[in-house]
Amino acid sequence: MTFSEFGRRAGENDSSGTDHGTASVMFVAGGGIKGGVHGQHPSLTDLKDGDMKFTTDFRRVYSDVLDNWLASDAQKVLGGKYEHLGLI
C-alpha cells in the first residue's frame, strides 16, 4: 500500500506546473487484492479553493487492510469504526 502525502492542484501555476493540493491517489497491490478502481474519481470542475475534493477517506482503506490483511483491530488502531472499501 502506498500513497503520496500531498495531492496536486487541478489548475496550472505560472510555470506551467501544478502546486501541492489536497486530494491524491492510493495504490494497494498484492495477490489478495480485488483489482480495479475503488471509490469515485474526484471532479476536476467542482473544486474547493482550487483543490480537488477527496472522495474516499483514507481510513476506509486502512480499516480494510488492518482488519482483513493484517488481522488486527482497525477500530483500536484508528480510534473509530470506518466502513471497509472492499479491497480484500
Image: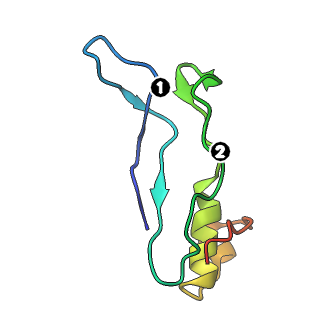
Point out the image quarter for the C terminus.
bottom right
Is residue 46 shown left or right of residue 17? right
Find disc 2 in the rendering and name its residue. 55
4 on left or right of 32: left
Amino acid under disc 2: Thr
**Quarter of the figure with residue 19:** top left
Residue 52 lies, with reference to residue 58, above or below; the image says above
Residue drawn where x is 44% and y is 72% of the image: 29
Q: Tell me if 36 is positioned left or right of 79 in this view.
A: left
Local secondary structure at mark 1 = loop
Write down the residue under mark 1. 10
**Badge 1 density bin: few <14, some 14–19, many ≥20, Cα 10 Å:** some
The x, y position of residue 12, in whole percent, is 37, 18
User: Is tag 2's residue or tag 1's residue first in the polypeptide sequence?
Assistant: 1
Which residue corresponds to the image point at 30% horizontal and 11% vertical from the top-left? 14
- Taking the image as shown, residue 63 lies to the left or right of residue 32, namely right
Residue at horizontal 57%, vertical 27%?
44
| Residue 36 placement (x, y as % from top left) | 56, 63
Residue 84 picture location, percent across and down: 70, 69
Element at label 2: loop
> With respect to residue 67, does 6 lie above or below?
above
Q: Which mark is residue 45?
A: none
Would you identify the image quadrant in which residue 33 lies? bottom right
Q: Amino acid at mark 1?
A: Ala
Residue extending furthest toward the front: 36
Q: How is the image coloured?
A: rainbow
* Residue furthest left as drawn: 15
Do callouts 2 and 1 mark residues in contact (Cβ within 8 Å)?
no
Closest to the observer, 30 or 13: 30
The N terminus is located in which quarter? bottom left
